[in-house]
Image (spheres, coloured by chain):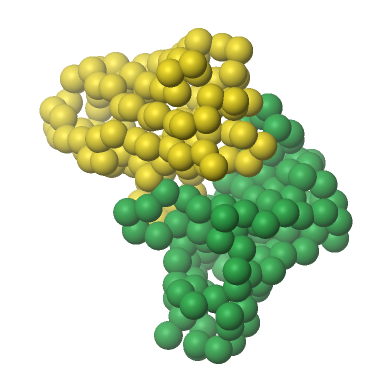
Amino acid sequence: DGGITQSPKYLFRKEGQNVTLSCEQNLNHDAMYWYRQDPGQGLRLIYYSQIVNDFQKGDIAEGYSVSREKKESFPLTVTSAQKNPTAFYLCASSPGLNSPLHFGNGTRLTVT
Amino acid sequence: KQEVTQIPAALSVPEGENLVLNCSFTDSAIYNLQWFRQDPGKGLTSLLLIQSSQREQTSGRLNASLDKSSGRSTLYIAASQPGDSATYLCAVNNNDMRFGAGTRLTVKP
């Protein structure tokens, strides 16, 4: 089955540690996105990539980093510089600008 | 910067009612608008995608309309069921996707 896989579903880290969230898609989509969702707020865009080896900052990129070395993979690293990292993180992909966005099931990160 | 607003934030209706969810956006130069459903603790499921050249899309009991010039979209749900209870989000595509905060719908049996 084609889809987007985010792992793990739940992640716990101590403050000051970097952590990497995985996002893999087998849909052959060019574009991939990372969003953060906090209670009572809409999704906020962290980073997006329209093509391999290229990515752009979204609205809240500070404290995060990404890479796009392969078409099917777009990992997100939450660094110790992110002041409030506890949130629900959602990865999405799309074939192109005029096409629907498809989402993974999310990773809930808790930093204590 | 595109701003997307969804009203109401929460809605509770008895089973069987028809209902309308609203989405407004500030920049009309969009490629498309997409409606999603999100169940608690889950990712988003795409419901309908409306291209900028289209006025509406229908899927089963769902109908979404788009008035680009006024910056508005509505999601109409006919004959609501308890299984429709979820948060509904709209997203607007201006080269990246901007989301509203969602409408939390509860359909009571």
Height in image: A7 above or below B14?
A: below
Height in image: A54 above or below A81?
A: above
Residue A11 seen? yes
Quarter of the figure with the N terminus of chain A: top right
Q: Which chain is yellow?
A: B
Q: Nearer the viewer, residue A86 or A29?
A: A86
Height in image: B42 above or below A63?
A: above
**Residue drawn at 58 percent across, 83 percent down:** A80
B60 on left or right of B107:
right
Q: Position of residue B66 (x, y in %)?
A: 47, 17
A58 on left or right of A26:
left
**Residue drawn at 54 percent across, 42 percent down:** B1
Q: Position of residue B32 (x, y in %)?
A: 59, 25
**Residue drawn at 32 percent across, 54 percent down:** A40
Q: How many marks?
A: 0
Quarter of the figure with the C terminus of chain A: bottom left
Which picture quadrant has residue A81?
Answer: bottom right
Which picture quadrant has residue A20?
Answer: bottom right
Residue B73 seen? no
**Residue drawn at 49 percent across, 77 percent down:** A83
A108 on left or right of A21:
left
Q: Nearer the viewer, residue A89 or A16?
A: A16
Q: Nearer the viewer, residue A27 or B63?
A: B63
Question: Chain A takes which shade in the image?
Answer: green
Q: Position of residue B17 (x, y in %)?
A: 18, 20
Q: Position of residue B68 (x, y in %)?
A: 50, 18
